[in-house]
Image: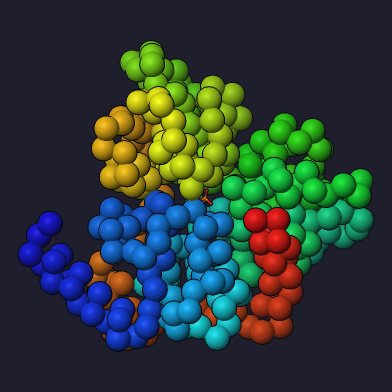
Amino acid sequence: MMDSDAKLIEEILRLKGERNAIILAHNYQLGEVQDIADLVGDSLELSQKAAQTTAEVIVFCGVQFMAETASILCPDKTVLLPDMHAGCPMADMITAEGLRQKKEEHPGATVVCYVNTSAEVKAQSDVCCTSANAVRIVEKLADGREILFVPDQYLGHYISTRTGREMILWPGFCPTHLRIKSQDIIRMKQEHPRARVVVHPECRPEVIALADEVLSTGGICRFAGRTEVEEMIVGTELGIIHRLRKENPDKRFIPASEQAVCPRMKLITLENVLWSLEEMAPEVRVPEEIRLRAKAAVDKMLEVG
Ligand code: 13P
Ligand code: SF4
């Protein structure tokens, strides 16, 4: 660690105490940002923590929809996103107006929205899900109504194969996960024949078909901790490798593709975390009328867990 980093960290921790703040970081954050967080986790774990914390301020080291979800759950807290430009391109692939039109085409459908959506889109949905609970949530929808799943067509396709439920899929995708190709997995398996292949369900179906485990980022971390396997080929965003190596120093983690980087996740730095705590900005707040409707969809998800 450089001297300048040590100073930044000291200042962040001092201000965090002064402001009664908690720092939540997604598994894709830069290693140095993960290292100062109170919790590093996946979208579900971070929203559960946001819902439970007694801190007055949440510094969200992740992307916009994650900070918005925290604000939906905790309207009395100040939610800070250290860089306002940290949006999720997949979440931007669907608008509230686009969803409204699609619902008109399928008036009886249950709308299941991936958490990677704006608050406005959540407000128009029946139930929210993350990659950790999507299969369980769709399995619970037993009323026989059509299901409209937005916006990730690949996660939607994976849920369909796991549940046997046909779904109408919005054609969104994660540009970062699409960089992982089946040829990458095949090559890595040839180079590391004893390794298990663990991938995120946002990957292409042909990548998922080659995987031993398909898990959320939190699920990948838990799997790495409990498995006897010593070598893993990891098919998701590269930031997770920092946590995996830190928690499992005796195991070997091989990125499926060095190109699987989410540039928006990397916008959060120690510098802007400190600045954010100093200025108490930029703040993410969801208008009350939208928040209440979005909260109904998020609460339904949290009931399932
Ligand atoms: P997780 O909920 O599995 O952490 O996924 C979030 C995400 O944005 C994946 O690209
Ligand atoms: Fe969005 Fe993909 Fe980045 Fe996750 S990795 S935040 S889905 S662009």
Give the side of residue 89 with respect to residue 194, left or right.
right
Q: Is residue 105 left or right of residue 95?
A: right
Between 56 and 64, the residue placed more toward the observer is: 56
Q: Is residue 80 above or below residue 62?
A: below
Question: Where is residue 91 drawn, in percent x and y?
Answer: 58, 58
| Residue drawn at 27 percent across, 32 percent down | 250
The reply to whether residue 157 is in sight is: no
Q: Position of residue 305 (x, y in %)?
A: 65, 56
Res 34 → quadrant: bottom left
**Viewport quadrant of the N terminus:** bottom left
Q: Quadrant of residue 29?
A: bottom left
Figure check: 288 above or below 293: below
Q: Quadrant of residue 58?
A: bottom left
Specify how the rendered protein is coloured: rainbow
- The residue closer to the viewer here, 46 or 250, is 250
Which residue is located at x 9 percent, y 60 percent? 2
Residue found at x 34% / y 85%: 19
